[in-house]
Image: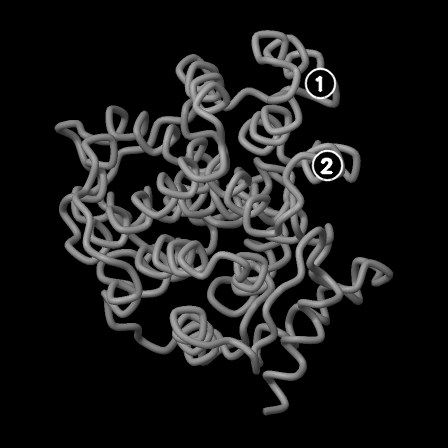
């Protein structure tokens, strides 16, 4: 009960723009999701609770993240947390950087964690771990030779983290750890948290636990990277279907078409602090669709730019929590899905290198 109360209190303080369903009030599908997360992570973390206005999206997020990240069929949890941290750095998500680098204090070392936080993977002594971190940081600019058996887990973590970082940037506060801590105090704090989290980081996980939360759905062709791992493939098919259904409910077709058109040529490049690119694209939409279009485009391409004004404009047209979560989730998913689809062509080759020393 103490853990539940603490988690609820933390979520209430960190979640912005929507009112999360309290842990003690969750029923049905949401109650099942909360129960799994509490059992496997020790608390119901705010990234799960921010999805709570739409229980099926809470389930989709959990399945998309859990199945590639937690079971360790061929890739160690240390490698996966390094990948997750690198993606978080790439997407300017300090909250997720804190969340995943903490685990590396126990799974790898302080030096590995701090090199990734500082965006200096070349300083990691293990060359195989450094290589996978560089690839995760910039999957379109850095080559990486996969073992065939590792592909579903590694690409799965990348796709899940590209989804998660966008949602966190929109709905959560910027930092997981107390922002007033100095560098030395932060490192000591992380060592302490990592020791507490050791069971959740190291205990074995059975593949497929999240699958019954969502109805079966086929694996889309653009997610062929998951096809060799049955649990991940099933999770991806089910989660993708849930995200697409959310978009159909809450994002007008013209806005969906606009984002998809932009993603066709997007290579993950940083847009900087300017929104000129976004405002130019919005000119093709009717004026009444622009608040939705602005939220969708920024969430997908530059989620760190979503601010109170963007949300207020969206809320003026669509006041319900459910609609806001669905629109942001669809946009986050489309960006993550686009990245995954292009990684299919970069990882389906004849040469696969063993990830020696990273198991």
Q: Tell me where residue 223 sits by quadrant.
A: top left
Which of 167/56 is in front?
56
Give the CA distance from mark 1 to mark 2.
21 Å
- Viewer-closest of 269 and 81: 269
In the depicted view, which residue is nearer to us: 47 or 150?
Answer: 47
Quadrant showing the N terminus: bottom right
Crowding at dot 1, Cα within 10 Å, few <14 / some 14-19 / many 20+, comes out as: few
Q: Quick one: 293 or 192, which is closer to the camera?
A: 293
Q: Tell me the tag on residue 135.
A: none
Q: Taking 28 as reference, is 302 left or right? A: right
Quarter of the picture containing the C terminus is bottom left
User: In the figure, residue 279 lies in which quadrant?
Assistant: top right
- At horizontal 24% and vertical 24% (from top left) the residue drawn is 345
Q: Percent position (x, y) of residue 325?
A: 55, 47
Image x and y of residue 186, in percent: 75, 64
Q: Residue at x 60, y 22 (%)?
A: 289
Point out the tag, 1 or 2, that comes first from the N-terminus.
Answer: 1
Q: Which residue is mark 2?
A: 316
Instruction: Name the outermost residue toward the bottom.
Output: 1
> Secondary structure under badge 2?
helix
Mark 2, residues whose alpha carbon is within 10 Å: few (<14), some, or many (≥20)? few
x%, y% of residue 263? 44, 20
Q: Please tell me in which quadrant of the rendered image residue 44 appears.
A: bottom right
Residue in the image at 55% along x and 20% along y: 269
189 displayed left or right of 40: right
Q: Secondary structure at mark 1?
A: loop
Residue matched to label 1: 275
Estimate the x, y position of residue 284 in percent, counting from the top left.
57, 8
């Amino acid at each position: 009960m103490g853990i539940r109360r603490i988690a609820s209190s933390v979520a209430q303080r960190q979640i912005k723009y929507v009112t999360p369903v309290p842990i003690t009030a969750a029923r049905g599908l949401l109650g099942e999701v909360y129960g799994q997360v509490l059992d496997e992570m020790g608390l119901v973390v705010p990234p799960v609770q921010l999805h709570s206005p739409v229980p099926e999206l809470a389930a989709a997020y959990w399945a998309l993240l859990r199945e590639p990240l937690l079971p360790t069929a061929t890739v160690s949890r240390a490698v996966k947390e390094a990948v997750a941290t690198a993606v978080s750095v790439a997407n300017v998500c300090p909250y997720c950087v804190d969340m995943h680098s903490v685990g590396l204090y126990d799974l790898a070392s302080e030096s590995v964690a701090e090199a990734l936080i500082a965006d200096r993977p070349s300083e990691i002594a293990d060359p195989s771990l450094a290589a996978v971190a560089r690839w995760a940081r910039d999957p379109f600019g850095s080559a990486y030779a996969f073992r065939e058996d590792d592909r579903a887990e590694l690409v799965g973590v990348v796709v899940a983290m590209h989804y998660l970082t966008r949602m966190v940037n929109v709905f959560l506060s910027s930092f997981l750890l107390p922002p007033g801590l100095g560098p030395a105090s932060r490192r000591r704090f992380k060592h302490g948290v990592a020791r507490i989290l050791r069971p959740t980081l190291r205990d074995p996980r059975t593949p497929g636990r999240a699958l019954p939360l969502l109805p079966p759905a086929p694996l889309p062709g653009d997610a062929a990277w998951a096809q060799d791992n049955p649990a991940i493939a099933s999770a991806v098919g089910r989660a993708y279907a849930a995200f697409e259904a959310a978009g159909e409910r809450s994002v007008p077709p013209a806005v969906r078409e606009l984002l998809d058109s932009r993603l066709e040529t997007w290579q993950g490049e940083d847009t900087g602090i300017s929104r000129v690119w976004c405002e130019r694209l919005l000119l093709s939409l009717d004026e009444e669709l622009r608040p939705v279009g602005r939220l969708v485009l920024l969430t997908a391409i530059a989620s760190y730019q979503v601010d109170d004004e963007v949300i207020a404009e969206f809320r003026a047209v669509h006041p319900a929590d459910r609609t806001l979560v669905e629109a942001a989730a669809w946009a986050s998913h489309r960006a993550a899905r686009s990245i995954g689809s292009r990684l299919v062509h970069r990882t389906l080759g004849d040469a696969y290198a063993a990830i020696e020393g990273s198991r």
